[in-house]
Every structure is written in structure tokens, then in C-alpha cells.
Image: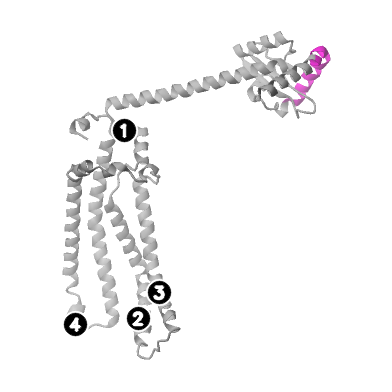
Amino acid sequence: MSEVDQESKTELPSEKRVQEAFEKGQFAKSAELNVVATLAAMLGVLGIAVSSATRELSSLATNVWGQLGTTEFQSGSVPVQLGECGKVMAQVLMPVIIAVTVATLLVGGFQSGFRLAPKSIGFKLENLDFSKGFARVFSKQSLVKGVIDFLKLIAIALVLWLGARTLVNDPIFVSPVEAGYLGDFIRRATVEFLGKMVLALGIIAAISYSYEKFRTHKNLMMTRQEVKDENKQSEGDMHTKAAMRRMARRLMQKQMLAAVPTADVIVTNPTHYAVALKYERGRDGAPVILAKGENQFARRIKALAAEHGVPVVENKPVARVLYAMGKVGETIPAELYQAVAGILAFVYRTHRLYFHELKIRRAAAEGAVGRTG
């Protein structure tokens, strides 16, 4: 990316841009952190379990080398002895392997925010672009990486020099010592070297990760035009979703209005709410809500009901509860069974001719649905 493009990026990255970058694997990550975590895990295990590991290895060495002159090697005994050696080595190495694995996973999770980056997995043809590869080799990032690698080389050399300078004065180099002292010397030397290495590389890893954070944030910065384009796109998505919701609502209203002529009764507020109910003995376990609406849509339901002679009953509390708690296509709330039963009993007594015609109307409606299907 050119310097002009970078200079025009003056706006902070949006949440959407950051999320998309994470999914592509574009987040701050430093290989030095993994190295430091591995060394720190090894140092921790050596500090905790080195004594028991030393005893196990010493016991194994004593058994093997102490009885080497008297041991008879046979085809059946060799696998057993090798198995014992493998068991001891596994006991010694397993804590180190587990600690290093856990440390690597934790550091990787820390850098990625413990989120997956599925789009970063897989083969990409753009990685084979030699022109881009050549540009990356001579880029500012490569220069910084070269400086960090040089610092690592200096740090390792300095740690080795300081460690050797300290340990060269140990009695093991100037006078006879017991065999057990060798194991203690190796332990102390290893812990000392690893401790200094973790400290030195930890400083370099902090510098490297801070640079990667800065570089990633800078690359994700947006121009004002990009911010405007993203806002327009978000608004477009919002308008599209709103349009889809309006379309679904109109379709639902159309279906409800089509069901009104087959209702048993319309319960009204009388002006604010209207709820159409249906109950067929032997088919419905309880009265079913065919349609419901408020204000203007309630008036459309009542007008359609009047056009087809559907009984209308005014009951303000029942209408309010039916509208608030009931769902179209489902049975009424159990709390309203008794109240609705009284309303249906009333319309059954007073509108006998309508319910005689309603059976024919419902049969015709079901036949039309069957032919359409």
C-alpha cells in the first residue's frame, strides 16, 4: 500500500472491519511470544519436577550400567528392558510436552482473542504472486523483522556468554566431584540458561508484539470514504431488512383477512382491537385465533366481518388480553377459556343461520385450498 493511501487513513477501524480482519487471520501475532512461552513452560516444569526426573534417570542409569556386566541379553528380555527405559523417559518428558503444548495454545489464544479465523485457512493463489513476494522481501516490515532477528541473535549470544562466564568457575571444572554432583550441575546450568533466555527474549517479544499491534491497527485504519461507504452499506442492509419485514407483515395481514369470513366470532374493544376466533368441534382442542389487529387493521377486520355477516361481540377486557397474549394460528390462552366459551355460546344461540352457512363456507374454502395445493 502506498504512503499516500496510508496518510489518507485517518479514521479508526469499525467493529465490522476489525471482525472481518480477525476472520482472515489479520491480527497482531508474534512468533517470539510462542518461543518465550515454550521456554517459560520448560523452565517451570524443570523448576518443579526436575528433582523427581533426576531421581528417575539416576535410578535407570544405575540399573542399566551397574548390572551391565552381569546381565544376560536374550531375545525376550531386550524388549522388556527397552520398555522400562521408554516408560522412564515418557515420565520425564511428558510433563514438558504437556506444559509446552498448553503454553503454546494459551499464547495463540491470547493473540487471537480466543477466536477462530476460518478464512485464514486454505491455499491462496495470491501467495504465489512473485511481484508481491518480492515487494514483501524489501518492505518496511521485513526490515523490522530483520532488526528483531538481529536482536534475538545478540540476546542469545549474550546469555550464552554470561552463563558460561558464571559456570566456568564451578568446582566441577577445577576439582574432582561426586557423580551425583554432575546431575545437580546440569540442572542448575539449564535453569540458569533458560531463566536468562526467557528474560532476554521476553523483552524482545514484547517489542515485537507491540510493533505488530501498532502495524495491524495502522493497516486497519480507514479513510473517510471507506467509513461513508460502510455506513451506506449498513443502512442499505437495514433498509432491506425493514422492507422484508414489511413484506412479511403485509403477507401475514393478507392471510389473516382471508381467514376472517370463516371465523365464528369477532371480539372487539370496540374501536382499538379486533380478534377473529374459530372453533370446530372434533378438530380444535380450543378456540383458535384466525386474525387480530389494532386501530386501522382492526377496522379492516370488522368491515370484512360485516361484509360476510360474521358475528361481532364487544368485550373490552377479553379483546385486550386476546390481542396482547394470543398468537395467530394458535389456540387462545387457557385463562380465557371460560370467557370465550360464554361468547361462543351467545353467538351460537343468536346466529344459528350464520353457522349453518358457515359450514358450507368453510368446506368451500378448504376445497379451494386443496385445488391450489
* Mark 3 closeness class: few <14, some 14–19, many ≥20 residues within 10 Å: few
Identified by mark 2, the residue type is: Ala
Q: Are marks 2 and 1 in contact (CB under 8 Å)?
A: no
Residue found 64% across the figure and 25% down from its top: 327
The stretch drawn in magenta includes residue 177: no
Q: Between disc 2 and disc 1, whose residue precedes? A: 1
Residue found 37% across the figure and 79% down from its top: 60
Residue found 37% across the figure and 68% down from its top: 93
Mark 2 residue element: helix
In the image, residue 265 sits, relative to residue 152, either above or below, namely: above
Identified by mark 4, the residue type is: Ser
Mark 4 = which residue? 175
Identified by mark 3, the residue type is: Gly
Screen quadrant of the N terminus: top left
The stretch drawn in magenta includes residue 353: yes
Q: Are marks 3 and 2 in contact (CB under 8 Å)?
A: no
Tell me how many marks there are: 4
Identified by mark 1, the residue type is: Pro
Mark 2 = which residue? 61
The magenta segment is 336-356
Q: Is residue 60 visible?
A: yes
* Mark 1 closeness class: few <14, some 14–19, many ≥20 residues within 10 Å: some
Mark 3 residue element: helix
**Closer mark to the observer between disc 3 and disc 4:** 3
Q: CA distance from mark 3 to mark 4?
A: 35 Å
Q: Are marks 4 and 2 in contact (CB under 8 Å)?
A: no
Mark 4 residue element: loop
Q: Between disc 3 and disc 2, whose residue precedes? A: 2
Please state which of residues 98 and 284 is positioned toward the viewer in this rendering: 284
Please state which of residues 116 and 40 is positioned toward the viewer in this rendering: 116
